[in-house]
Amino acid sequence: LRDLPSGKVAGPLVYTSGLGFTHPKGHPIAQPILNRPATPDEARAMVRGLAAEKADFVKIWVESKYGSLPKISREVQFAIVDEAAKTGLRVVAHIFEESDLRYLVNLGVRDILHTVRDAEPTAALMNYVKSQNVCFSPTLSVIDANWYLAENAAAFEQEKNKAAASESVRSRLSDPEARKEILANQDIPMLKKELERAQRSPSGPTAARGMS
C-alpha cells in the first residue's frame, strides 16, 4: 500500500486511519477491535501509536445511536484532536448531532463523515460550515442500503448491482420472503426520515464521495 503513491506498485491510492476511536462501549459496537480509550491520556497514547504506524488520518465515531449507547466524551475528543494536530495527522469525524459537529469544527476538524441528522439543516448551519471550510462525505447509500434493494427488486436485477453484492447478499435479495423480513425492520421509517433530512441542504457546503 505504501508503494502505491510512488508508482512502484500499480493500483488505486489507498488511505487508512488504522483503528478508529470510540467510547469503550460505544458505536460501532459490532466492531470490537477499535481504539476505545477510557481517558484522555490513553487517547493521546493511541494517537501517537497511529502516527508511529504511519496512518494517514485519525477517525472518531461520535454517535449514541439515539441515546442507546454511550458517546465518546468531549475530554477524550479534545485529546484525540489535539494530539493528532501535534503529530501532523488529520481528523475525520463520524457525527450525527449538530452540537457535536460544531464542537469538533471549533477544535479544528474539517472533514466530516455523514451529515447532521438530529435536526433539519438550517441556513445558519450551512453558513457556519461553509465559513469554516468543512467538507462532508454524506455516504447516503449507507442509509438507504437498509431497504432500497429489498424494496426495489428491479434495481437489484441490474448487473452492476448484482456484481457489487456478495453471494450471500445476492441469495438473500433474490428471496421474496427474505426481502419481506428486511422491510419488516421497525427502524426503516426513521431511517427514511434521516435520508430525507440528509438530502436537504440549502446552498450546501463541499461534499466528497466515498464510504466510511
Image: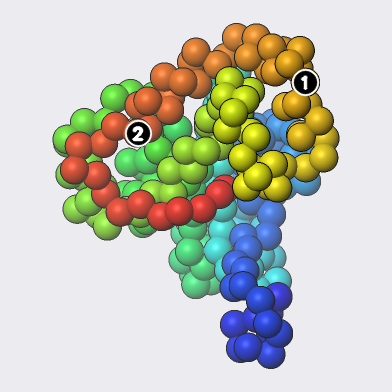
Q: In the image, residue 21 lies at what x, y percent?
A: 62, 47
Which residue position holds label 2? 199
Q: Which residue is disc 1 drawn over?
A: 175
Q: Amino acid under label 1? A: Asp
- Helix or strand or loop: what does disc 1 sit on? loop
| Residue 75 spot, x, y in % from top left | 50, 43
Reply above or below: 25 against 35. above
Numbered disc 2: secondary structure: helix
Q: Are marks 1 and 2 in contact (CB under 8 Å)?
A: no
Question: Upstream in the sequence, badge 1 or badge 2?
Answer: 1
Give, as a three-letter code, the residue at label 2: Gln
Q: Locate residue 23: give its quadrant.
A: top right
Quadrant location of residue 206? bottom left
Gap between marks 1 and 2 measured at Cα: 30 Å
Instruction: Quarter of the image for the N terminus: give it.
Output: bottom right
Q: Nearer the viewer, residue 211 or 28?
A: 211
